[in-house]
Amino acid sequence: MPTQDADADKLARLKKARLLRESRKLKPDEEQADAEEWLAGEEQWPAF
């Protein structure tokens, strides 16, 4: 049915728009610092 395709397309566009909107809120420097801080508490993996 054409309306189902149109609904699916609109939903896909809304999801993409939301992803883009939320991505703009990220601050790469802060994200990197948080990741490095979190990883600092992790144990090193054994060498294989």
Image (cartoon, helix red, strand yellow):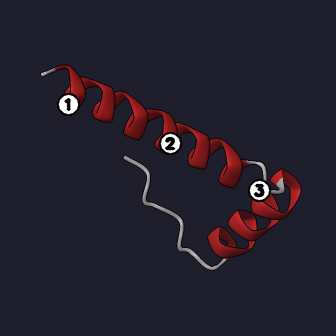
Residue kind at label 2, given as amino acid type: Leu
Which residue extends farthest right?
29
Q: Nearer the viewer, residue 45 or 14?
A: 14
Give the quarter of the image for residue 20.
Answer: top right
Q: Residue at x 37, y 28 (%)?
A: 9
Q: Rounded to the nearest whole Å, what is the CA distance between mark 3 and mark 1?
A: 34 Å
Which residue, given by chain and number where applicable, does mark 1 sit on? Answer: 4
Callout 1, which amino acid? Gln
Reading the image, the residue beneath label 3 is 26
Residue type at mark 3 is Leu
Residue found at x 41% / y 34%: 10
Q: Quadrant of residue 11?
A: top left
Where is residue 29 drawn, in percent x and y? Answer: 87, 56
N-term-proximal mark, 3 vs 1: 1
x 69%, y 49%: residue: 21
Looking at this view, name the residue that lies furthest to the top: 2
Residue 14 shows which numbered tag? 2
Viewed as shown, does residue 3 lie left or right of 33? left
| Crowd around label 3: few <14 · some 14–19 · many ≥20 (10 Å) | few
